[in-house]
Image (spheres, grey):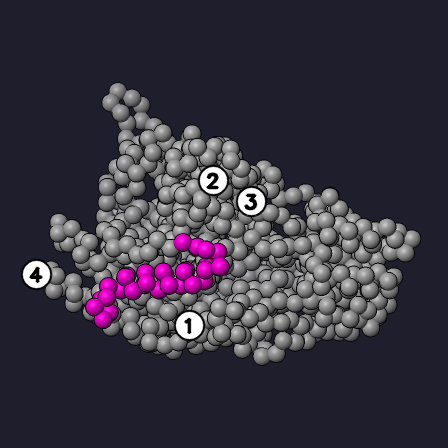
Amino acid sequence: MKNFSLRLFIYVLLAVTTAYAADVTPWTRNLSAPFTPSQGLAGRHICVWASHGRYFNVNGHPTTPRDSLRIGAWQWQRPNLFCTTEDLLTPSFVYPFLIPMLENAGAVVWTPRERDMQTHMTIVPQPTRQTARHYEWQATVDTLGAYAVYVRYPALPDAVPDATYTIHHGGERTRIAVNQRMGADTWVYLGTYHFNPAIPRDGLIRLSTATNYRGRLAVGSVRLGGGMGHIVRQAPPKKGTTPADAVTSGLPHYLEAARYWTEWAGLPDSLCNTEHGLGDYNDDLRSRSNMLNLLMEQRGVPFELSLGVHTDAGYRTDSIYGSLAIYTSPNSIPRRAAQGDSILYCDGGVPGGELLCRHLYDGIVRDLADLDWQHRGLRDGNYSETRAPHVPAAIIEMLSHQNFLDMRYAHDPIFKFRLARAIYKAILHYSQQDHCPTIQPLPIHSFAAILHKDEAHLSWCATPDTLEPTALPTHYIIYTRVDDGDFDNGQLTDDTHFHQPVTPGHRYTFRIVAANDGGLSFPSEQLTVYKAPNEPTAQNALLVSAFTRLSGPAFISTPDSLGFLLNEDPGVPYGTTLEYCGPQLDFSPLKAGKEGPGALGYSSSEWEGRPLTGNTFDIVPRRAALLVQADSLTSFSSACADALPHISPTCDTPWASIYYLAGQQRRAPHNMADFPVWPHNVRPYIVQSLEAGCPLIVEGTYTSPEHLSPEEREWWESLTEKKDKYHIKNINDAAPIGKPASFNTTPHI
């Protein structure tokens, strides 16, 4: 009874702490952002993790199928099914979609696994320079690309809550304030930035000595990039045998289990090595909650909730298996476990985890109703991930990785976005139970960037959310990048038009983010404007971004074959993904419900850890860089294909040429949405431009007639048969996405 009363007191205290979480100076704040959401999840601290990861199987564990046991080796915690495994699949929901949505709403999100898939890494353990005004860490970046930036600092009793770091990235500077009164002795994420080794002093991190508080700055180390796994593990030797070599996972930190990242991130050995080196599987389950509790109770981070994002097993032959939300109440904790485990604090008599699960259930059912998505309800169970955290905690089993119909959706980026948005909104409603929250907007559309004299004239349209009337934007942020630098910190406007001065001889690339009090949208496509140095005599071309496709892989569904055809078409991921383990090997529907070799969906491992790049929504700036390199005397504007109906075909003077950049655009039965190469609303503009004598250059993988739909083909051939009148060049020899790239394999520490 004494222990029960003590734990109840702790959770009442946590409830009060959570209620005032928004009033606490957040762990990190972007001081360079032109707009900060005032509602949404501003000031909240949330813990999210993506199920499992690669771990070292010391002695085997009972949840792994016998035919896939690899004792004394690194392995996944779940079997390879339908070209992936749970350990690879859930990060493709959490890191590119869910966490950015929560952060866009103003939350500080911590995760016990590495969030950066960048395989290169550099650590600067101490300042390389110190002055009266600042400390400096000069990180060496040898490879152009995006890198997560982390800092680490020791605990000080008089630490200040406004330690300001300035990150020099791609010729830009971003200021991040860190509350050093919390979160000491671990890696603190400051954002992901583009670094260019050709730019002097890129990778410089400065910590200002200026502060508005009495106290001291905690000075520690800086890290750029996720890097490769560096923790070595070794199987215990058998009697009379030579001990095996200690080995790393051979994969990026991004794909490793939380047990290894938390060890590296400052979790004491007693909390991450609870099995004394003999059970990494159980250590992984415990380390997530142990690190969360340590950060909250000993290092001052006021977490509000914890969510584990998983998939599970189960199959149906003719329907979707669907989602399941899990929590732990006092009723489900065995008496023998009560001494060391939590009982989730209650709100109005309802366990916090159960209340969170109710919001997850309601949100997913509502947002995915048009898909006939199934929800298996709520489960009150004794699970470590929902029992051990000292905050309200839930698990969301998003879908079944064993069910083909579920996996048809699971591989599609559009579904990932929709499900992640439903989860984000559920967390928002849970966090603001007594309020009607404002939902962050959807990305803009009909974006155009037209060169007019010495300015780039930008225009766009807001995208309404039919499910959320509050998701309308009230502001927009215009981000600008010059040549090969990084995007700046943005300019704020309330209008859907913006004029940006440009300097001849430089490429200006833009992207737009919609905003309201509830948060920020995902960014728009990137468009580029270039004014040639010899204006006004230079010709003016138009680059059209017609590549909007996002898709899962091709599949087969017949009475005797069921599964995915990665080698035929791996689909188009959002950005870059590591979700695939390899092509499917077994297609027999009669083997449904099994796991491992001989099961329906069983897949190879040849793609493990290899990044597959899909639509990065920068087809225009990539083509623009090549155009300037080949001919710097031609100016150009750019527009998304859906903006063409809003643009005059001549724009005062005829275009010298139109580059229609279709990329991997095509209609396909495995697309979740329609992605025609030639949408109906684009065709009049193309015809009018051809009639005005403008040459048309079409570039894309699927732009030849045999890849077009019958209706598109008929229209396209009606143009190409007029060879004497229209100037058309169709460049359709671009290689498909094909197989994923290789990756850096050198561990760094």
**Gap in angstroms between the C-alphas marked 3 and 4:** 56 Å
SS at circle 1: loop
Quick check: 186 left or right of 533?
Answer: left
Residue 1 badge: 4
- Measured as percent of width and height from the top left, residue 542 is found at 76, 62
Residue under circle 1?
A: 40
Q: Are marks 4 and 1 in contact (CB under 8 Å)?
A: no
Q: Which mark is residue 553?
A: 3
Judging from the image, what secondary structure is the residue with disc 3 in? loop
Where is mark 2, residue-wise? 82
Residue 202: percent from the left, percent from the top? 56, 59
What is the three-letter code of the residue carrying label 3? Pro
* Whole-number angstrom distance, CA of label 4 to CA of label 1: 39 Å
Q: Earlier in the sequence, mark 2 or mark 3?
A: 2
Instruction: Give the residues in magenta.
Output: 346-374
Reply above or below: 480 against 224.
below
Q: Of the residues tagged 3 and 4, which is closer to the observer?
A: 3
Where on the picture, by quarter, is residue 68? top left
Q: How crowded is mark 2: few (under 14 residues within 10 Å), some or many (20 or more)?
A: many
| Residue 727 visible | yes
Amino acid type, residue under disc 2 in the picture: Phe
Q: Is the magenta stretch mostly helix, strand or loop?
A: helix
